[in-house]
Amino acid sequence: MIKEGRRLVAYRNEAGERVGLRTELVDEAGQWHAQGVAAGKVRPLAGDGFPGAGKASHLLTDLLRCDGCKRAMTFRGLSYKCEKERACGICPAPASAYAGALEREVVSRWLNVVMALEPTDALAVKLAERWTALTLPEETEEARGARDALAAVESSLGRFMADRQAGLYDGPAARYFAPLHRDAIDPVEAAQKHLDTVAPRAVIDTSIVDEGQRACWHRTTGSDTPP
């Protein structure tokens, strides 16, 4: 049926025959999956729009994607497996990886990246900030307040310098510029000094790496002192 004005009339093809109109929004497998979810027989897939709760309980949750269908891989048993394959078995090439070996490889590569960082690297600073937020939340809040205070006084200094550029301190008013400039600079320097005191330092604790290396060296050589 099609709508003409306020009336519904039968749609006819070029031969005058009545035919139905249908648009397939999903393929047959997708339709089967949706019906299974509606009946409570099949788990919804990640990204299907169903509300979820809780947080990740495994290291690589939400980080892995199946190469066959590009869906998430979730933890089951001892492995990370294709979410789509688990739900309804329609992935063309479902992926599966043993969790222990995969997590060790990922952790090893990540630690290599961390160990190669310089204290001033952006990633090192971000790691320090996040670690402080987890272990010392009160100090992190103080640092956030210090940054806001610095931004405020820097904004005031910026407006002052804009007035200078606009000529407000030309002519007879020039003699007022130097003392007012110092009054604008001092709060900025004080705020920066306070921020330097309370901001998280980009110091990364590598003791867990060192302990792991020592344990591995001891198992291999029997010595307690790695080179």
Image (tube, rainbow, N blue to C red):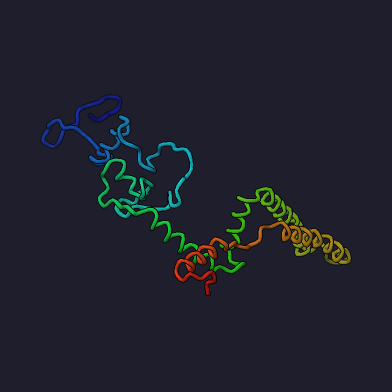
x and y, in percent, of residue 112 in the image: 49, 66
Check the image and report above or below for 209 versus 34.
below
Task: Spot the residue most to the top.
Answer: 7
Q: Is residue 148 left or right of residue 30?
A: right
Residue 8, given in percent of the width and then of the height, sits at 25, 26
The image position of residue 43, as x and y in percent, is 34, 37
Q: Is residue 89 visible?
A: yes
Tell me, yes or no, if residue 159 can be seen here: no
Please name the residue shown 66% across and 51% down the image.
140
Q: Nearest the camera: 210 or 137?
A: 210
Height in image: 64 above or below 218?
above
At a point 58% along the width and 66% down the height, the residue shown is 121
Question: Which picture quadrant has residue 39?
Answer: top left
Of residue 91 and residue 12, the one placed in the foreground of this image is: 91
- Of all residues, the one furthest to the left in this rendering is 15
Position of 130 with respect to 87 (left or right) is: right
Q: Describe residue 190's horizontal placement relative to residue 69 as left or right.
A: right
Q: Please give left or right for residue 112 compared with residue 147 in the image.
A: left
